[in-house]
Amino acid sequence: MALYYAARDPRTPWYARLVMLATLAYAASPIDLIPDFIPVLGYLNDLVLVPAGIALSIQLVPAEVLREARHRAATTPVSKRANWGVGALILGFWLIILLSVGRYGWQWWQTHHAR
């Protein structure tokens, strides 16, 4: 939560926000650099890359901004409400990707298996 508040602070540099966004996107994405079914390495990349991204984000945020963000995170109750707009956006993104892959797969099937 502290990094969330730090990212919304105008004193946070753009490159720190970019690292935070990339770390969050990688952590939330079902696509990994090394797939999870590969023994040890599949989970090791999650155990290394996500904490490394968080640590780098903390290093890039100015100390005063991070101090205020930590205080705000400790004193502000966490909202449990669902953000349906963001969920719909993510679902729509993945739906477009799946439909595109399906369309190109169908075209490939038609050209290679036409009788």
Image (cartoon, rainbow, N blue to C red):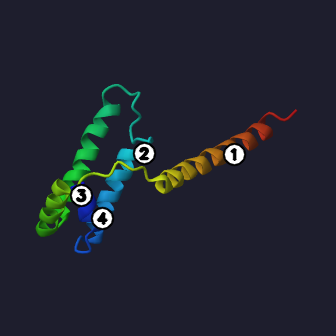
Q: Of callouts 1 and 4, which one flags the residue occurring earlier in the amino acid sequence?
A: 4
As helix, strand or loop, the secondary structure at mark 4 comes to: helix
Say which residue label 4 marks: 17
Q: Quadrant of the C terminus?
A: top right
For discs 1 and 4, the disc positioned in front in the rendered view = 4
Badge 2: few (under 14), some or many (20 or more) residues near its Cα, within 10 Å?
A: few
Q: Residue at x 49, y 52 (%)?
A: 84
Q: Amino acid at mark 2?
A: Ser
Say which residue label 3 marks: 3
Return the residue nearer the eye: 79 or 89: 79
For discs 2 and 3, the disc positioned in front in the rendered view = 3
Say which residue label 2 marks: 29
Can you name the residue that lies furthest to the right here?
115
Task: Determine which quarter of the picture holds residue 31.
Answer: top left
Looking at the picture, how far across and down is residue 91, in whole percent? 54, 48
Q: Amino acid at mark 1?
A: Tyr
Q: Residue at x 70, y 45 (%)?
A: 103
Q: CA distance from mark 2 to mark 1?
A: 23 Å
For discs 3 and 1, the disc positioned in front in the rendered view = 3
Q: Are marks 4 and 3 in contact (CB under 8 Å)?
A: no
Q: Is residue 51 left or right of residue 35?
A: left
Q: Of callouts 2 and 4, which one flags the residue occurring earlier in the amino acid sequence?
A: 4
For discs 2 and 1, the disc positioned in front in the rendered view = 2
Q: CA distance from mark 3 to mark 1?
A: 40 Å
Q: Are marks 2 and 1 in contact (CB under 8 Å)?
A: no
Q: Is residue 94 left or right of residue 25?
A: right
